[in-house]
Amino acid sequence: MSWLEDITSSIKYIEGHLTDELTLEKIAAKINLSPFYFQKGFSILCGITVSEYIRNRRLSLAGRDLQTDGVKVIDVAMKYGYDSPDSFTKAFTRFHGITPAQAKSGDGELKNYLPLKIHVSMKGGFEMECKIVKKPAFTVVGSAKIIKNEEGYKECPQFWTEHYEKGNGKYICGMYGICLDDGAPEGFFKYMIADDYIPSKDIPEEFETVVIPENTWAVFPCKGSMPEALQKVNTEIFKEWLPGNSDYEIAGMYNIEYYTAPCDYPKGNQDENYYCEIWMPVKSKEQ
């Protein structure tokens, strides 16, 4: 399937299972994507996280159900995965602006949140700079943090700040920012601030090493101040390159940001010429 077909298929699966237990991992597995890449791509394309979409759809349908004669609030709450009337009432009121009791009595208007339909408008003549590169396995060493899938954009920059505030920059400069699905609990991913592993270099025990396996990578250059330049290229990957690419698809559990040394630029990583790269593991669609 194409990238857009994958996301459309995931939405159809969600719609068919709104009264069942839904996890990011379960949905991603249905379209053969890693949870990290599924969450990232879904959020960029749809402008909302997977869990927010599921919650909004469930609460929208719950409002409709409460207008049925004889239905109990507790039954609707349980149907859509809430373990108590109180938690359901709080979520329902935040979403609709009225309580479930008011919805039952017809006192107030309900919000109608319709199923998403994916449509991407491709720009004429758009060509994104990208190199397909096969890299052998390599080992990195760095500090790691387990981050909730939906909090990556906020938590990863904070982790960089913590890394340098703790003085860890004297051991790990931060050549790479690496997202790994492997080894993290459900709903989370591991993020590493890392350098190439050099056996002769003295590194404190609290840092960990990870072997990045041999992969074919789509390498996207980014130029400009951080994080805006990086975020712009990320958006273009999921909105332009993946939908318009007929040769390659995502294949793997890693996402790597490669950074050049900020000290080489007059304004550091805020310099208009600052250079970094996004590496995404891919495979030929013919495989």
Image: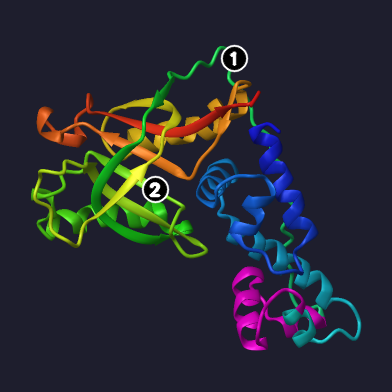
Residue pictured at 74% horizontal, 60% vertical? 112
Most common secondary structure along the magenta stretch: helix
Q: Quadrant of the N terminus?
A: top right
Q: How far apart in space, not on screen, are marks 2 and 1 (Cα)?
A: 32 Å
Q: Residues within 10 Å of mark 2 (few under 14, many from 20)?
A: many
Identify the residue at the far top of this view.
Answer: 125
Would residue 114 be visible to someone looking at this image?
Answer: no
- Check the image and report above or below for 190 versus 172: below
Q: Position of residue 148 (x, y in %)?
A: 44, 61
Which numbered dot is residue 221?
none
Q: Give the range drawn in magenta.
A: 79-105
For the rendered model, the colour scheme is: rainbow
In the picture of the structure, the residue carrying the numbered disc 2 is 179
Dot 1 falls on a residue whose secondary structure is loop
In the picture of the structure, the residue carrying the numbered disc 1 is 124
Using residue 275 as the reference point, say whether residue 69 is left or right of it.
right
Q: Tally the marks.
A: 2
Residue pictured at 36% horizontal, 29% vertical? 136
Three-letter code for the amino acid on which mark 2 is drawn = Cys
Using residue 23 as the reference point, say whether residue 67 is left or right of it.
right
Q: Position of residue 214 (x, y in %)?
A: 41, 33
Based on the displayed image, in which of its 4 quarters is residue 242 positioned? Answer: top right
Mark nearer the N terminus (2 vs 1): 1
Q: In which quarter of the image is the C terminus?
A: top right
Three-letter code for the amino acid on which mark 1 is drawn = Gly
Q: Where is residue 41 in the image (x, y as percent from the top left)?
A: 55, 42
Between 143 and 79, the one nearer to me in the picture: 143
- Check the image and report above or below for 255 versus 188: above
Would residue 226 be visible to someone looking at this image?
Answer: yes
Instruction: Let me know if residue 6 is in the magenta part.
Output: no
